[in-house]
Image (spheres, grey):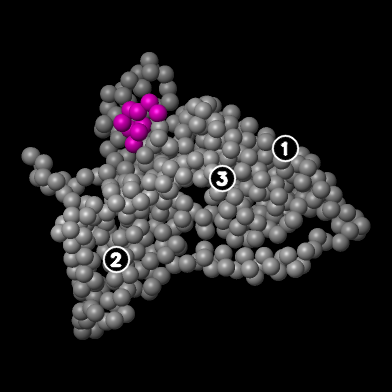
Amino acid sequence: MGKFTNFLEHKVSNPMARLAEQRHLLAIRDGVISSLPFIIVGSFFLIIAFPPLPESWMITQWATEHAAEILIPYRMTMFIMSLYVAFGIGYNLAQSYKIDPLSGGQIAVASLLLTITPSVVEELGFVIPMQYLGGSGLFVTIIVSILSVEIFRFCKQREITIKLPEAVPASVSRSFEALIPVAIVILLMTLITVVMGVNLHALVERMAAPLVTAGDSLFGILVPVFLITFFWSFGIHGVSVVGSVARPLWEVYLLNNGEAVASGADTLPHIAPEPLYQWFIWIGGSGATLGLVIVMLLFARSKYLKNLGRTVVAPSIFNINEPVIFGLPIVLNPILIIPFVITPLVTATIAYFATSWGLVSPTFVKAPWTLPAPVGAYLATGGDWRSIILVFVNIAISIGIYLPFFKVYDRKMLDMENGESTPID
């Protein structure tokens, strides 16, 4: 066991930990996360515009008549989330390079806007199409935001900037330092979009089409679920590693589903936005550990696990499971790693088929992740009561999977407390 642990630590854990700290992945992750308040608040206006209430109710009729006005906050937040993400990526990447983060965020936003060609509309003048400022433009947003900050960094390192005397206020000096990088980015993006007539969004959409299709399949759901629990098993924050790559795709799904609801579509295009994982797969946190906590509360015989179960139940209800992962521990625990990996794969399969068969509505609202799962699932599906049943079904299944493994581990812990066994190596 010691050799296996050393192998995991040196050959798997350390390289994956370094990957999780890669500056561009961190900037993408933090940039997307910085937009979450706008996505969460904006998505709730979809519920207000289309309340999960009988059509005969007066409030439903009022919402239907005023849907266009109610959805304006949604259009200005979640619907143009790429604009917020661009600033977040640019800001965080520039900050990691220790160059002016405000300029980095602004350059990234300008770069994104220059990928879109304005149109002239009578009585309105120049109009920017909003479709590429939402989830469908997220891939291009990531590319041009990183590119623009790298140009900024290159100019800064090579001192291709305008330097002002020290007596000039710092804010003015920083603005002039960004002047040449901004000019290069604007000229480059103008050359691509205007002179060459390249629609980067359409080009990237065609290139990413297989990825979008694959990510919405059962296989595309099971792969990130497996990888996240696999990394967590070695003490690596799995969501940080996998989410940096997968979250842009999940946000595209979420926005497309939200727009389908806003346009009055009968069916939603995607099964696998991030709320599917949050509310139906990772119930209680990565590994679906709420079921494990319930098993601890009901079946633990060792004093340590009894006390731990009482301690972690409240955080687990609100999807905070680091105390479980590191307190049991699950990390590098040869007994509990098995159900920790298997359980979410099973709940993911059930959630996928329940959604694809129409037993539960697809998710389209980004509810706060700290809500209890039944509440979050109900909100994320726009008020589908069947989602609550699916949550409890998956909790029951997770209990059944964890129980036999937990009993084995509990016996070992009880023997250790009675002095009849040695710690698990």
Closer to the camera, 72 or 132? Answer: 132
The residue positioned 32% from the left and 55% from the top of the image is 141
The residue positioned 22% from the left and 81% from the top of the image is 163
Task: Look at mark 1 in the image and give the residue it sits on.
Answer: 400
Q: Label 1's element? A: helix
Crowding around mark 1 (Cα neighbors within 10 Å: few <14, some 14 to 19, many 20+) is: some
For the N terminus, give its image quadrant.
bottom right
Asked whether, in this view, residue 303 is left or right of residue 373, the answer is right
Spatial separation of the CA atoms under disc 3 and disc 1: 20 Å
Total marks in image: 3
* Residue 286 position in % (x across, y down): 60, 49
* Residue 65 position in % (x across, y down): 27, 23
The amino acid type of the residue labelled 3 equals Leu
The amino acid type of the residue labelled 1 equals Gly
Question: What is the span of residues highlighted in magenta in the rendered image?
Answer: 259-267
Asked whether, in this view, residue 391 is left or right of residue 198, the answer is right
* Residue 266 position in % (x across, y down): 38, 26
Task: Look at mark 3 in the image and give the residue it sits on.
Answer: 222
Task: Look at mark 2 in the image and give the residue it sits on.
Answer: 148
Q: Earlier in the sequence, mark 3 or mark 1?
A: 3
Vertically, is 196 above or below 177? Answer: above
